[in-house]
Image (tube, helix red, strand yellow):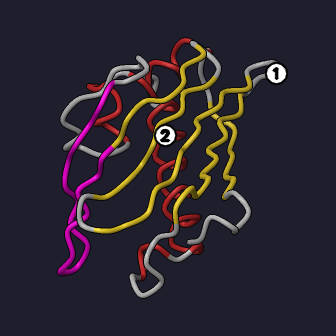
C-alpha cells in the first residue's frame, strides 16, 4: 500500500448501545475477544502504546500502535507500524449511533509506503482483514457480551 492510495474504508452495522460498542473497541479485555488475543496493552488515551507479534505463514509482524486521537463514544485513531517492515498508517474507528443499528466505520490511511512484495501489505489484503475483524466485532456484539 502506498500513501498515494485512497484510504481503505470498511463499515458495517452492529447491535448495541454506543457505550457497548465503544467499550468493545477500546477496552483491552473486550478487544482480545474479537480483535487480537495477544494485544499486550491498550488504553483509549493519546500516547498509549501497544506492541504485540502476529504470525502469518513464516513472517512475523510485530504490531506497534500509538493512540493519536480520542473523541469518546465517537472516534479513536492510532498509528500502526510494524517492527520488521517500513511503512506507517493510521487507523480510525468511528461509531455512528444516530440511528439503530449503529454503524462502525474503519478507515485506514497510509502515511508512509509499505513494501510491495509482502502479500499482507496489498490493498485487498488490508480491506479483507478489516472486513474480517468488523464481522468478528459484529458477531461479538450480537452475543450481548
Q: Residues within 10 Å of mark 1 (few under 14, many from 20)?
A: few
Query: What stretch of residues is rendered in magenta?
Result: 48-64
Tell whether position 140 is magenta.
no
Above or below 132: residue 33: above
Residue at the image position 68 percent from the left and 44 percent from the top = 12
Residue underneath mark 1: 99
Q: Residues within 10 Å of mark 2 (few under 14, many from 20)?
A: many
- Image disc number at residue 137: 2
Q: Main secondary structure of the magenta part?
A: strand
Asked whether, in this view, residue 120 is left or right of residue 38, the answer is: right
Residue at the image position 54 percent from the left and 66 percent from the top = 128
Above or below 85: residue 27: above
Quadrant of the image occupied by residue 111: bottom right
Above or below 132: residue 106: above
Nearer the observer, 62 or 137 = 62
x then y, percent, for residue 135: 53, 50
Q: How many marks?
A: 2
Q: Secondary structure at mark 1?
A: loop
x then y, percent, for residue 9: 69, 53
Quarter placement of the N terminus: bottom right
x then y, percent, for residue 76: 54, 27
Tell whether position 52 is magenta.
yes
Amino acid at each position: 500500500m502506498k500513501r498515494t492510495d485512497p484510504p481503505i474504508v470498511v463499515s458495517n452495522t452492529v447491535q448495541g448501545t454506543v457505550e457497548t460498542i465503544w467499550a468493545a473497541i477500546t477496552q483491552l479485555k473486550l478487544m482480545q475477544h474479537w480483535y487480537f488475543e495477544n494485544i499486550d496493552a491498550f488504553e483509549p488515551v493519546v500516547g498509549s502504546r501497544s506492541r504485540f507479534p502476529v504470525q502469518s505463514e513464516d513472517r512475523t509482524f510485530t504490531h506497534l500502535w500509538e493512540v493519536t486521537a480520542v473523541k469518546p463514544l465517537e472516534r479513536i485513531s492510532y498509528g500502526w507500524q510494524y517492527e520488521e517492515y517500513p511503512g506507517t498508517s493510521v487507523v480510525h474507528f468511528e461509531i455512528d449511533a444516530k440511528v439503530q443499528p449503529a454503524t462502525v466505520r474503519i478507515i485506514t490511511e497510509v502515511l508512509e509506503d509499505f513494501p510491495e512484495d509482502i502479500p499482507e501489505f496489498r490493498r485487498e489484503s488490508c480491506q479483507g482483514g478489516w472486513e474480517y475483524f468488523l464481522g468478528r466485532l459484529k458477531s461479538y456484539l450480537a452475543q450481548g457480551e
